[in-house]
Image (cartoon, rainbow, N blue to C red):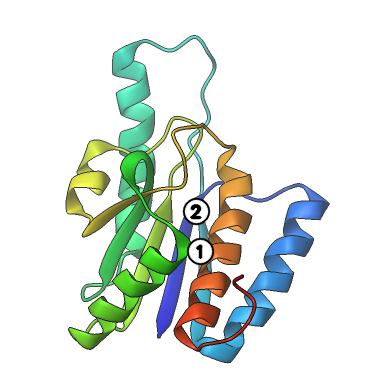
Amino acid sequence: MRIKIIGVGKIKEKYLKQGISEYSKRLQAYGQLEIVEVKDEPFKEPLSGKEQEQVMEKEALRIEKEIPGRCHLIVLDREGVAVSSPQWADYLQQRMLSGDHQFVYVIGGALGLHDRIKEASHWRLSFSALTFPHQLMRLMLLEQLYRTASILNGEKYHK
């Protein structure tokens, strides 16, 4: 399995970098992992609806350049489908049995993802109806990917 994570913005906090590094190492046992950071578009609040759209459009263009032609695209979206870890593992297993082997996950910036990116996705995944910092979501995504890999391999990490 090949996993690519596209995240808007740089991770600045040391504790997040440490956690991301740890789960990245753990995931190497299950396949290839690539993490790509695309530049976030600077803005000052308050923003009009049109200005928000412009910021998300610029970030979307950067994201689209990183999405490979043949992949299974999954976006993190609080309005997406919420599943348990075993359900997520089942979903990935079904996709792999159908021939998908490259999974690309996209985490939007501070304003979220442009609708065009959401509409292009194969699956919109929600971790919660709550809003989380997009930097923290990268760590949470990696932990859950590690958890799903351990489930798929019959290991004891997931209890």
Circle 2: element type: strand
| Residue drawn at (43%, 57%) of the image | 84
| Residue drawn at (41%, 82%) of the image | 2
Crowding at dot 1, Cα within 10 Å, few <14 / some 14-19 / many 20+, comes out as some
Residue furthest to the front in view is 159
> Contact (CB < 8 A) between labels 1 and 2?
yes
| Residue drawn at (31%, 65%) of the image | 67
| Residue topped by disc 2 | 7
Tell me: residue 32, above or below residue 104. Answer: below
Q: 12 or 129: which is nearer to us?
A: 129
| Residue drawn at (37%, 65%) of the image | 87
Q: Along the polypeptide, which appears first: circle 1 or circle 2?
A: 2
In the rendered structure, the answer to whether residue 109 lies left or right of residue 121 reads: right
Q: 98 or 49: which is nearer to us?
A: 98
Give the label on residue 50, or none: none
Q: Position of residue 10 (x, y in %)?
A: 62, 50
